[in-house]
Image: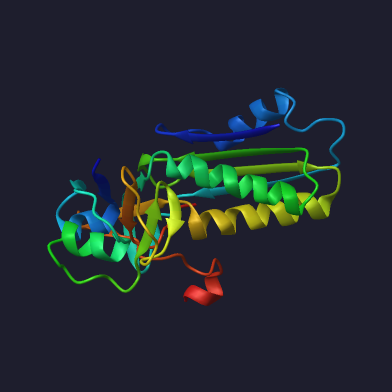
Amino acid sequence: MAVKVRFFASLREQVGSAGCEIPFSAELTPAKIWLLATKEQSMPTKLLIAINQEYATLADSIREGDEVAFFPPVTGG
Amino acid sequence: MIEIRLLAETFDPWRTLSAWADRGGHGIDSGACSVFIGTLRDFNAGAQVREMWLEHYPGMTERQLQRLVKDAQSRWRLNSVELVHRVGRILPGEAIVLIAVSAAHRGDAADASRHLIEALKASAPFWKKETLADGSSRWVTGNTLGYASATA
């Protein structure tokens, strides 16, 4: 099973994609996924990450089938 | 009674509040109700705003809002919470968010209401994109502190 990658809001526009799937491999982290999914675009300084719709960090571990999302600071309300 | 709703269409916060009260949202066991309503201003960061698009992360948004309400329930003694948030296209004057909190006592109601709007703005995955009077558009990059004196 692959890992599902999603980008939201201004980040989706910067990356030029709403998301993709990347093959699972051992020792995958959001930091590595960012490089693979964006073809090594530079990472914004204010970046939020979610794994399976829960806030996470760049170094968290990823399992097969996880959904990993990258997005800018939130501005609701 | 906890209700959390995302709406893709415009809503009247005053009628929503009244309907909530009619459904028993503010029962006889409550002695205080604190309400926060957020609407779209026609200006932001020095420009006239014509309309706004509110994007969100379906699934995570609902999950996060539920967590925030649960957290508020564990910190204050609350009887009911009504939380309604818009997504999609919003025009100036229209409501973006409604938070109503009923409790036996005013401190619990007022503190939880204030906490909920601040926690929502800090952590619920919504993003605003403004269309300005000249037709250009821009993503809102962060929240203000919430006081005119701090944004002037």
Q: Is residue A52 visible?
A: yes
- Residue at coordinates 26% horizontally, 58% vertically from top-left? A10
| Residue A18, percent from left and from top | 21, 47
Residue at x-position 79% and y-position 52%: B108
Picture quadrant of residue A75: bottom left
Is residue B29 toward the left or the right of residue B39 in the image? right
Q: Is residue B39 left or right of residue B106?
A: left
Which of A9 and B14 lies nearest the eye of the viewer? A9
What is the x, y in percent for residue B69? 63, 45
- Residue found farthest to the top: B23
Question: Which quadrant is home to the N terminus of chain B?
Answer: top right
In the image, what residue occupies the spot 24% across and 54% down?
Answer: A25
A9 up-or-down from B17: above or below: below
State how the image is colored: rainbow
Residue A76 screen position, x and y as percent: 45, 53
In terms of depth relative to the viewer, which is nearer, A68 or B33? A68
